[in-house]
Amino acid sequence: MKACRSLSQTRDNRRQLTMMQNRSNQRHDTVTPEYEQQVKELSAALCERFSGEARVLVVAGSGLGGFVRSVQVVQSAPYAELPHVGASTVAGHAGTLVYGMVNDTPLFLMNGRRHLYEGISPQTSTLLLRALLVAKPIRVVVLSNAAGGLNRCFQVGDLMLISDHINWMFRNPLRGRNVEAWGPRFPDCSEIYSARLRALARELALEIGINLREGVYLGGLGPSYETRAEVQMLRGVFAADAVGMSTVHEALIARHMDREVLGISFISNLLTEPAVTTHEEVMENARLVEDKFSRLLNALVPKLAAEA
């Protein structure tokens, strides 16, 4: 009987642990009153720390932080010094918010981002973006990332305009209570990436001699890179052109708040042939494309701001 009681107690303990984990997941993986308060506090801190305003926000992904060198920095703050944000733990993500000028045009630059694979929720990973859009009159959000190329026509170093995305993370930062002041309960995402902004980017890229690809970006949870079977599925079943570990949740937040979104993927490695993928390879290839990416954004930001 003692053994039976021990087994029963073990099962009860497991059930209680499961219930506690479920409650914790519900609390930390949804929009809650606590999260709403965090957004308010962070927005207030941003208004206090950054006096300037801008119409354009650029989010620089893995290894693409070199664009910051072309920005005349006016004010900056490490993420770790901003309430509720936390420092990025990923190499290649500086984790700094910058307010500055590009060709006499003001902008905000998120130099690095937080990822779900760091052990945080979709709400936490997009908290800074949400608070910035609450605090500042930003109308255009430019999201950049490093991505593996699935399209056989792509080459390492290509820049791909994101025409659409697939949320393979199976999580959504809008889950939970909806704050009407931020956006609607059921936002339309049929054109989550602005066709108007893509056309503008193609026109400017042609003028400065940069060839832009275009395709569908698939955002996975990470941090492991894709298996060969997964690559075959992503290319064949999902018809994705590139795959990465970010961006889709940021795009959802921006569209929820009625901002125009332009997405740009840097093709950091090719998944069309069997090969070992490393983060070091991604970072090294990013350095090779920094100049091209910077030239594109230097031409694009003033135009985006003027037409926002």
Image (cartoon, rainbow, N blue to C red):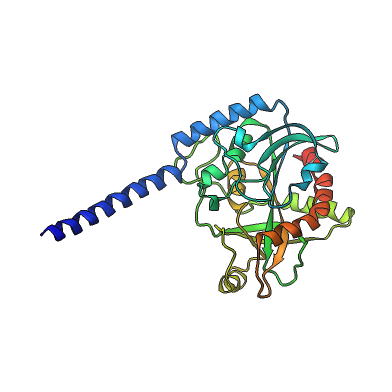
User: How many marks can you see?
Assistant: 0
Extreme residue toward the left, this view: 1
Q: Quadrant of residue 158?
A: bottom right
The answer to whether 179 is drawn above or below residue 239 in the figure is: above
- Horizontal arrangement in the rendering, residue 225 relative to residue 20 (left or right): right
Question: In the figure, 307 relative to 152: above or below?
Answer: above
Q: Does the image show residue 160?
A: no
- Residue 212 figure quarter: bottom right
The C terminus sits in image quarter = top right
Residue 37 in the image: x percent, y percent?
49, 31
- Evaluate whether residue 17 shows in this view: yes
Residue lying furthest front in this view? 2
Q: Quadrant of residue 134?
A: top right
Q: Is residue 189 left or right of residue 302?
A: left
Q: Quadrant of the N terminus?
A: bottom left
The answer to whether residue 257 is left or right of residue 156 is left
Write the residue at 23% across / 55% down. 10
Depth check: 212 or 231 in front?
Answer: 231
Q: Residue at x 53, y 57 (%)?
A: 169
Camera-side residue: 127 or 194? 127
Q: Position of residue 198 (x, y in %)?
A: 75, 53
User: x, y percentage for residue 157?
Assistant: 78, 61
